[in-house]
Image (cartoon, coloured by chain):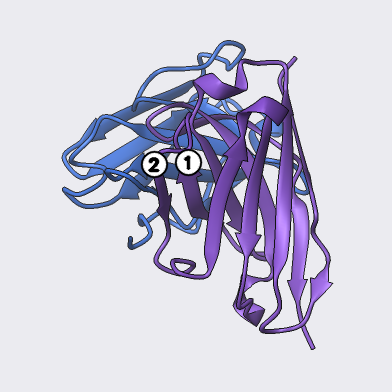
Chain colours: A blue, B purple
Amino acid sequence: QSALTQPPSASGSPGQSVTISCTGTSSDVGGYNYVSWYQQHPGKAPKLMIYEVSKRPSGVPDRFSGSKSGNTASLTVSGLQAEDEADYYCSSYAGSSVVFGGGTKLTVL
Amino acid sequence: EVQLVESGGVVVQPGGSLRLSCAASGFTFDDYTMHWVRQAPGKGLEWVSLISWDGGSTYYADSVKGRFTISRDNSKNSLYLQMNSLRTEDTALYYCAKDEDYGSLDYWGQGTLVTVSS
């Protein structure tokens, strides 16, 4: 049950694109197509942004997209907006458990 | 509208016990696996435990195994977390969350704060 690895920070200017990586192992990210991404604003509960690697829940803008290659998943935010500034966490199903990444603070410059 | 409301968080001494509750509404509670996830102050999310729709299967993070027990009462649309032998490192905001599909947590409560301190 080791945490997934995310960069601690990422940044981009409004309108730009930014990609956040999430690296696990063949026991979690690489072994299942059940990677999720969550957005968390300060003092708020996490919000599901991406599930099953690349699917968006209803209401999530299509500026948010997900992908996976091997043991690494990625979240891309296109057309950055000020309200995208938040902490982002990846997670993966790991066969009877869930493992989260350490989180990435996204700053919109 | 889906709502998850946690309660039971307090200040407790190391070695103490506590039971957290989560009241669910707005969805068919007994159709879904439920989770507890915690977040220590200023830190990231940590998965704690999950329970299947019927309570027949439960799983725990290594950090809480043997000390915490997850349970549910589908007749009351409620989820619980019994926390024993509490340690200072258990201090965190505890969220309950609904599982849409294999760990995709689509709804979260606002959390209840547990502080373990002497």
Residue type indicated by callout 1? Ile
Q: Which residue is mark 1?
A: B51
Asked if both marks, 1 and 2, belong to the same chain, the answer given is yes
Query: Could you give the CA–CA distance between mark 1 and mark 2, rounded to whole angstroms?
Result: 6 Å
Residue at 32% from the left image edge and 44% from the top image edge = A96
**Chain letter for mark 2:** B
Residue at 60% from the left image edge and 78% from the top image edge = B85
Q: Is residue B98 above or below residue B64?
A: above
Q: Where is residue A58 shown, x and y percent of the image? A: 57, 11
Q: Give the mark nearer the N terminus: 1 vs 2.
A: 1
Q: Quadrant of residue A90?
A: top left
A22 relative position to B21: left or right: left
Q: Quadrant of residue A85?
A: top right
Are discs 1 and 2 less than 8 Å apart at CB?
yes
In this view of the protein, which residue sits in the foreground, B37 or A23? B37
Q: Is residue B14 above or below residue B36?
A: below
Q: Where is residue B107 shown, x and y percent of the image? A: 62, 28
Q: Regarding mark 2 in the picture, which secondary structure is present there?
A: loop
Q: Which residue is mark 2?
A: B57
Number of dots carrying numbers: 2
In this view of the protein, which residue sits in the foreground, A59 or B98? B98
Quadrant in the picture for the C terminus of chain A: top right
Q: Is residue A109 visible?
A: no
In this view of the protein, which residue sits in the foreground, B59 or B39? B59
B27 relative position to A68: left or right: right
Residue at 35% from the left image edge and 25% from the top image edge = A52
